[in-house]
Amino acid sequence: QKEVEQNSGPLSVPEGAIASLNCTYSDRGSQSFFWYRQYSGKSPELIMSIYSNGDKEDGRFTAQLNKASQYVSLLIRDSQPSDSATYLCAVFPNAGNNRKLIWGLGTSLAVNP
Amino acid sequence: DAMVIQNPRYQVTQFGKPVTLSCSQTLNHNVMYWYQQKSSQAPKLLFHYYDKDFNNEADTPDNFQSRRPNTSFCFLDIRSPGLGDAAMYLCATSKDRLQETQYFGPGTRLLVL
């Protein structure tokens, strides 16, 4: 059973701080990794995709992938109240029939003014 | 702007009364997906189309059907909605392959009375 695990939170950080969100996955051969942001009652919005080990930066967001340790993280610098949302990690496995994105349950982030 | 559009945004139906949700995309993507998402849960893939090829998930109830008459449009038909089918229904697209980034529409919130 392929799995993606996230701490459900809530993760609470003060405005301006760095928020660190973590995700672990079970399929060692996974190749594609995605972070989505989902506001309450809205649809998921892509924040970042990452495919190679290391860091990928986009504005205030940095995704970090470590395939050896099977985790992917998302750092949000200078957190803003508007970043308060649920962050979903999704992983595309490399093996098996009928491959599809495997989703974590999400981490709820609250940024306090 | 290229986008994924879903209509209606909110749908109220009666128990057992068929309902159709629609999705259109201007991204010219080959793959279209339908997800069901309930509160505090991860999106659950119902089925996807790769071009005209329909791929049903094994655990998708027969009550759920889909049509893709052309590249731009995809429909979700719920033949006899039950109370348990109340959820957010999300349409997503990806360009060519399942492991690529998925872009979501705004979703349709379905309420079954």
Image (cartoon, coloured by chain):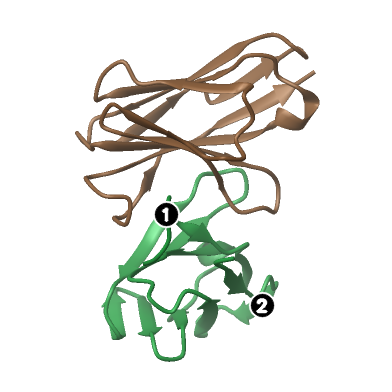
Chain colours: A green, B brown
The answer to which of A6 and A29 lies nearer the viewer is A29
Please tell me how crowded label 1 is: few (under 14), some (14-19), or many (20+) other residues with Cα within 10 Å.
few
* Residue pointed to by mark 1: A97
- Dot 2, crowdedness within 10 Å: few (<14), some or many (≥20)? few
Q: Chain of mark 1?
A: A
Q: Tell which of A91 and B9 is nearer to you.
A: A91
Which is more foreground, mark 2 or mark 1? 1
Residue that lies at the very extreme toward the bottom in this rendered image: A68
Residue of label 2: A12
Give percent across and percent down for residue B77.
Answer: 54, 18
Mark positioned earlier in the residue sequence (2 or 1) = 2
Q: Is label 1 in a helix, a strand or a loop?
A: loop
Q: Looking at the rendering, which quadrant does residue A92 occupy?
A: bottom left
Seen in the picture, residue B95 relative to B51 is either above or below; the reply is below
Q: CA distance from mark 2 to mark 1?
A: 39 Å
Q: Quadrant of residue A4?
A: bottom right
Q: Tag 2, which chain?
A: A
> Which quadrant of the figure contains the N terminus of chain A?
bottom right
